[in-house]
Image (cartoon, helix red, strand yellow):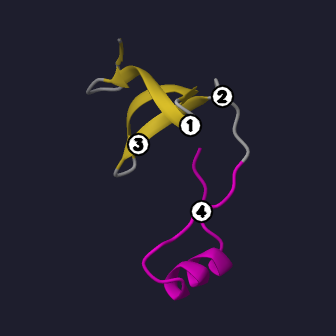
């Protein structure tokens, strides 16, 4: 899930000090997610709940040239 921050959210981050709370989003356990680093997708997986926390279980990673490698 990716989205741009609104001008109001950016202003709140700048005024809020060192701790910034994440915006509230609606997600469902099992949803597919992409893991991105510096704008490049490096892996994908699914949202899971473990020990009361929402986490991403990586099920595959992107190889160079956009080939998918299953785990």
Question: Gap in Å between the C-alphas at discs 4 and 2?
Answer: 23 Å
Q: Earlier along the polypeptide chain: callout 3 or callout 2? A: 2
Q: Secondary structure at mark 2?
A: loop
Question: Gap in Å between the C-alphas at discs 1 and 3?
Answer: 18 Å
Can you tell which mark lies on residue 4? Answer: 4
Q: Is residue 31 magenta?
A: no
Residue at image mark 2: 29
Residue at image mark 3: 36
Q: Nearer the viewer, mark 1 or mark 3?
A: 1
Tell whether 69 sits left or right of 3. left
58 to 28, vertically: above or below? above
Q: Earlier along the polypeptide chain: callout 1 or callout 4? A: 4
The quarter of the picture where the N terminus appears is: top right
Q: Is residue 16 magenta?
A: yes
Contact, mark 2 vs mark 1 (Cβ under 8 Å): yes
Magenta range: 1-25
Q: Secondary structure at mark 3?
A: strand
Q: Earlier along the polypeptide chain: callout 1 or callout 3? A: 3
The quarter of the picture where the C terminus appears is: top left
Tell whether 26 sits left or right of 30. right
């Amino acid at each position: 899930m990716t989205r741009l921050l609104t001008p109001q959210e950016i202003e709140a981050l700048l005024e809020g000090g060192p701790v910034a709370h994440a915006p509230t989003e609606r997600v469902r356990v099992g949803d597919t997610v992409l893991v991105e680093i510096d704008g490049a997708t490096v892996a994908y997986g699914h949202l899971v709940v473990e020990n009361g926390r929402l986490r991403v279980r990586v099920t595959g990673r992107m190889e160079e040239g956009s080939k998918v490698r299953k785990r």
